[in-house]
Image: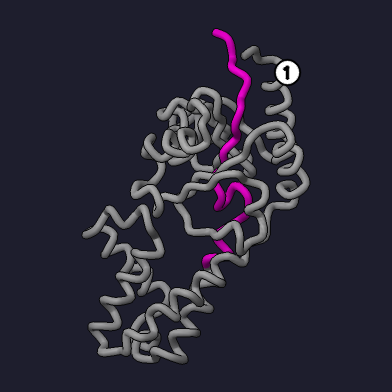
Amino acid sequence: MTSRRPLALLFDLDDTLWPIGPVIAAAEESWHAWLAERAPRVAQAFSVAELRVRRMALLERRPELISDLYQLRREALEEVFAELGEDPAHIEGSMRHFAVQRNLVVPFADVLPVLPLLQGMLRLGVITNGNADLEVIGMDHHFEYALSSSQYGRAKPDPGIFQAACAAMGVAPQDAVYVGDDLRLDVQGAQAAGLRAVWMNRHGSTAHLAAGVTPDAICATFDELLAWIRGQMQDSRA
């Protein structure tokens, strides 16, 4: 079977371009401190962890909110504010504060040197379940198109979100490659939609073996991704 020369390279964001766990943890602490100043009844009644439990409980009742985690956070906060009789005027301000903190990401060291090289070879895009703002972060100029689950209405691994991004870019799924860190959401989702999928495995995990997932490539760094893409460009025939 002839391998097709890729035309587009699409990326996951969180934990693929930058580590997200510490950023979210710091954002939630800052968000809670903001609430303590302006909505003290909420902050006194619920810790960061307890607010997270409330969001997860809401998600169980409203599973469609998985596609928009900001909306999930907002609606859970609305419930808490109403229960405690806190002024709902502070909800939007708290969401804006969280958004600012959530975008204080720092790319992995190998990302920014390699992205322009990939950009010179392929059309680059983004498909994300998260709410990172590439313009605020200062990386939007690397990508010609970005699609979030909140825009699309369904989240990865739904094949439709991958196919919609490809259609918007005018590229057939079989001519696109998706890069992400999550075996189920990114690799299986992209492959089910007809794309090739690269597993960005920075930690040397062998989870794909236990999961029975076969990525088209496994890369530990963006330098390895660049080398693999170069190989695909050289070895494949249109």
**In terms of image quadrants, where is residue 188?**
top left
Badge 1: how crowded within 10 Å, few (<14), some, or many (20+)?
few
Q: Is 167 in the magenta?
A: no
**What percent of the width, then of the height, locates residue 97?**
51, 77
Q: Relative to 222, does residue 65 appear above or below in the rendering?
A: below
Q: Is 7 in the magenta?
A: yes
**What percent of the width, then of the height, locates residue 86?**
30, 89
**What percent of the width, then of the height, locates residue 83?**
23, 83
Number of numbered discs overlaid on the protein picture = 1
- Write down the residue under mark 1: 234
Work out which quarter of the rendered image holds the N terminus and state it. Answer: top right
Q: Which residues are magenta?
A: 1-24
Q: Amino acid at mark 1?
A: Gln
Q: Relative to 14, does residue 198 appear above or below in the rendering?
A: above
Q: Relative to 230, does residue 74 appear above or below in the rendering?
A: below
Q: Residue at x 74, y 52 (%)?
A: 109
Q: Nearer the viewer, residue 126 or 231?
A: 126
Q: Residue at x 47, y 55 (%)?
A: 130
Callout 1: SS:
helix
Q: Residue at x 56, y 30 (%)?
A: 177
**What percent of the width, then of the height, locates residue 110?**
74, 47
**In terms of image quadrants, where is residue 50?**
bottom left
Work out which quarter of the rendered image holds the C terminus and state it. Answer: top right
